[in-house]
Image (cartoon, rainbow, N blue to C red):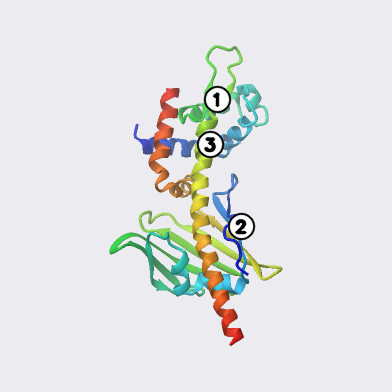
Amino acid sequence: MSDEDRLSRVFAALADPTRRDLVARLTEGDATVGELAAPYAVSLQAVSKHLKVLEDAGLVTRTKDAQRRPVHLEAEVFDLMTRWIERYRQRAEERYSRLDALLDELQDSRAEEDAS
Amino acid sequence: MTPIQGTHETTIAASTEVPTITITREFDAPRELVFRAHTDPALYVRWIGPRRLSTTLPLWDPRRGGAWRMKNYAGEEEIASFFGSFHDVREPERITWTFTYEGEPDSVSLETVTFEGLPGGRTRLRVVGVVESFEIRDQILASGMETGVTEGYEKLDELLATQS
């Protein structure tokens, strides 16, 4: 699988509102499929299907041995997403720092005009 | 008085309800001026593009129903071009426009830019961009990676490798 396929898999996994909600809830701690399914008006199977998509994308893992098989959020993958947003933010910040400098310059020249 | 650079934080919010990206930022300048820096083409090209690239506006008609086209160059080489329309331009408070990267001609972002006057001659800028799907929104967020893209992929590779 190419890098791009992997990346789109992560994005596709998070493109669904139920799956984003599952991920958000898992940031608070591990949970069983039953616990995760409780607030939704859908079947356990439907939630399992969503979890499978998240698992395939590498966003969650499930303990193999324990009876409860709790779902665990792979925080590092999730952090990676946050870092991507941070890079986007930095690019916007660079843009607006340039605008800051331009606005300063415009205000200085305006003040000079007023003074003369 | 020289305002200290970098004192105003740019914030980014990505909604989980609708595929939007919201950017907010404050400026130590009156909103008339911040607005003008968004509509005057001579001013706009001075801050919008990355520093290492030059920006040109072959078409720039900032009024209701007007169109725009923008190109980025590295030296003589064209790197990227963008186009869209001004849906509405209401001085000095609001600009609504569309934004398309020519490399992704089927994707369009509808952006609403608002300029809110704050006490002390300052301005709060808010940019809300909405696109067709969460997938496209997330791709746009990921496009901010630029040079970090390889590093990001490598890390993701490693993580995925340990889990399969």
Same subunit under labels 2 and 3?
no
Question: Which residue in the protein does label 2 denote?
Answer: B7
CA neighbours of label 3 inside 10 A, class few (<14), some (14 to 19), many (20+) = few
Label 2 and label 1: CA atoms lie apart by 46 Å
Task: Name the secondary structure under disc 3.
Answer: helix
Q: Residue at x 39, y 47 (%)?
A: B147
Mark 3 lies on residue = A79
Q: Are marks 2 and 1 on the same chain?
A: no
Asked if residue B159 lies left or right of residue A69, the reply is left
Q: Is residue A96 above or below residue A111?
A: above
Foreground label between 3 and 1: 3
Kindly indicate whether the residue at mark 1 contacts the one at mark 3 (C-beta within 8 angstroms).
Answer: no
Farthest residue to the right: give it.
Answer: B119
The residue pinned by badge 1 equals A48
Res B119 → quadrant? bottom right
Q: Nearer the viewer, mark 2 or mark 3?
A: 2
Cα distance in 3D space between marks 3 and 1: 24 Å
Residue drawn at 51 percent across, 42 percent down: A83
